[in-house]
Image (cartoon, rainbow, N blue to C red):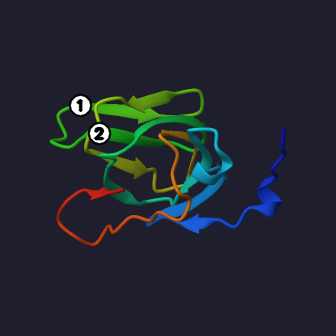
Amino acid sequence: MFIRTKENITAVEWGNGLSYRFLVGADGMGFTVAETVVHAGSKSRLQYRRHLEACYCIGGRGQVTTADGSVRYELRPGVLYALDQHDAHFLIADDREDLLLISVFSPALRGDEVHSLDGAGFSEY
């Protein structure tokens, strides 16, 4: 057994926010658990080709949309979304406050991954 506290984790600037990665690959658990902060007013083009991801909203508001924009889900505390098909998507935080998520990745992240959000494609890792 081991214990981690947020105060003892160095946040990773992932592209449009911060990721506090509580579990990573080196921990041997097979999955990652992170608290993800998505900066207010940001829109991120994301896709995880090597990981499945589920995110549970614990604060703020926003949206997650399909790559083509045809399907849009509202995010608010108590809502979970799961990217079970390596879905390309947009993660959009409301303009008024940061969006806070608990994110789970399988398989586990190394822990140092960041997004490149300045290109035309969907950022992946």
Residue type (three-letter) at the residue carrying disc 2: Thr
Marks 1 and 2, Cα distance to the nearest angstrom? 6 Å
At mark 1, the secondary structure is loop
Measuring 51% from the left and 51% from the top, which residue is drawn there? 109
* Picture coordinates of residue 22, whole percent (x, y): 69, 50
Task: Look at the image and tell me whether residue 74 can be seen.
Answer: yes
Q: Residues within 10 Å of mark 2 (few under 14, many from 20)?
A: some
- The tag earlier along the polypeptide, 1 or 2, is 2
Q: Is residue 94 left or right of residue 68?
A: right
Q: Is residue 24 left or right of residue 81?
A: right
Task: Tell me, yes or no, whether the two marked residues, 1 and 2, touch with CB atoms within 8 Å.
Answer: yes
* Picture coordinates of residue 18, whole percent (x, y): 57, 62
Q: Residues within 10 Å of mark 1 (few under 14, many from 20)?
A: few
On-image quarter of the C terminus: bottom left
Nearer-the-camera pick, 105 or 38: 105
* Picture coordinates of residue 14, whole percent (x, y): 48, 64
Q: Which residue is mark 2?
A: 65
Measuring 46% from the left and 50% from the top, which residue is drawn there? 94
On-image quarter of the N terminus: top right
Q: Is residue 89 left or right of residue 19?
A: left
Q: Is residue 61 above or below residue 110?
A: above
Q: Is residue 67 above or below residue 112?
A: above
Residue type (three-letter) at the residue carrying disc 1: Val
Q: Which residue is mark 1?
A: 71
Measuring 19% from the left and 60% from the top, which residue is drawn there? 121
Q: Is residue 81 above or below residue 38?
A: above
